[in-house]
Amino acid sequence: MPAAPAAGPKTVSAKPKSSYPRKLRIIGGRWRGRRLDVSESEGLRPTPDRVRETLFNWLQPYIAGASCLDLFAGTGALCLEALSRGAAGVVMIEKAPLVAQRLRQHVERLEATGAEVVLADAVDFLRRTPRAFDIVFLDPPFKSNLIADCAALVEAHGWIRPGGLIYVEAPSRMSELALPATWELIRSKKAGQVGYHLARKTA
C-alpha cells in the first residue's frame, strides 16, 4: 500500500493588527510625554498626533487662559492637550458611558483641575442653557452628518464668543464644510483621510 503523501505545512492566516492606538500621548506643555490608556469604542477616532501638533501650533497664541468645549471628547486628546498647554478650563462631552468613565480616570490621574466630563449626546447638550467658550472642538464621527447640526446649534445658542475659534475635523474628501455664515475659515489642511480646519466667529 503506497504511503500517504506527507502533509504540507499548515497555513495560518495572520490576524490583521488593529491600527487603533492603545495609548494617548500628550505632545506638549506640562504633561508632555505622558501616556494614557485608550478605550476602544465604536465610532471613536482619535485625532492623529501630527494633526494635533499642527492644530496646537495654530492655537498657540490663544490657548493660555482659554475656556474650551469638546463636543465629541472620545479619548480626551484635544482638551487634555489644551489643559497641558495652559487652558484655564475644559468641558468634555461624551455619550458613551465607558469612554466617559475612562476620561474621568485621565482627569484624576493627571490631577487636572479645571476639567469637567459630561455624559451626554452632543446635540442634546447644545440645547441646554449655554455658556460662551473661547475655543470649541467639533470632531464628530466621520459616518455622521453632525458637523452642520452642531455648528448651527453652537452659533444659534451662543456657545462660542465673538472672536472665538472653532476646530472642525472632517473627512478629507469633504469639499465644503457646512458652517454658519458668521464663521470665517482661517486655516485648512489635509493629512491622509483627515481634513482639519480652524474657523473664527466674527464679532
Image: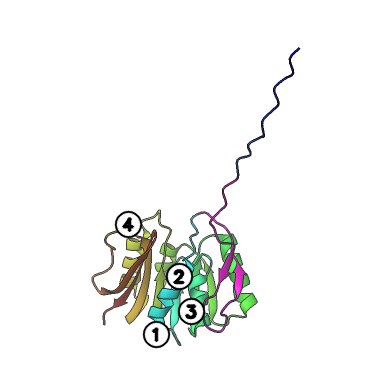
Q: Which residue is mark 3?
A: 82
In the rendered structure, find residue 50 and report the number of the disc placed on it.
Answer: 2
Q: How is the image coloured?
A: rainbow
Query: Mark 2 and mark 1: span between their CA atoms?
Result: 19 Å
**Mark 3 vs 4, N-terminal side:** 3
Q: Which residue is mark 4?
A: 173
Query: Mark 2 and mark 3: span between their CA atoms?
Result: 15 Å
Residue 27 is covered by the magenta coloring = yes
- Given residues 18 and 152, the one toward you in this image is 18
Judged from the image, the secondary structure of the residue bearing numbered disc 2 is helix
Residue 7, can we see it? yes
Q: Are marks 4 and 2 in contact (CB under 8 Å)?
A: no
Identity, as a three-letter code, of the amino acid under mark 4: Arg
Residue found at the very far right of the displayed protein: 1
Horizontal placement of 66 versus 162: left or right? right
Q: Nearer the viewer, mark 1 or mark 4?
A: 4
**Extent of the magenta region:** 15-42
Judged from the image, the secondary structure of the residue bearing numbered disc 1 is loop
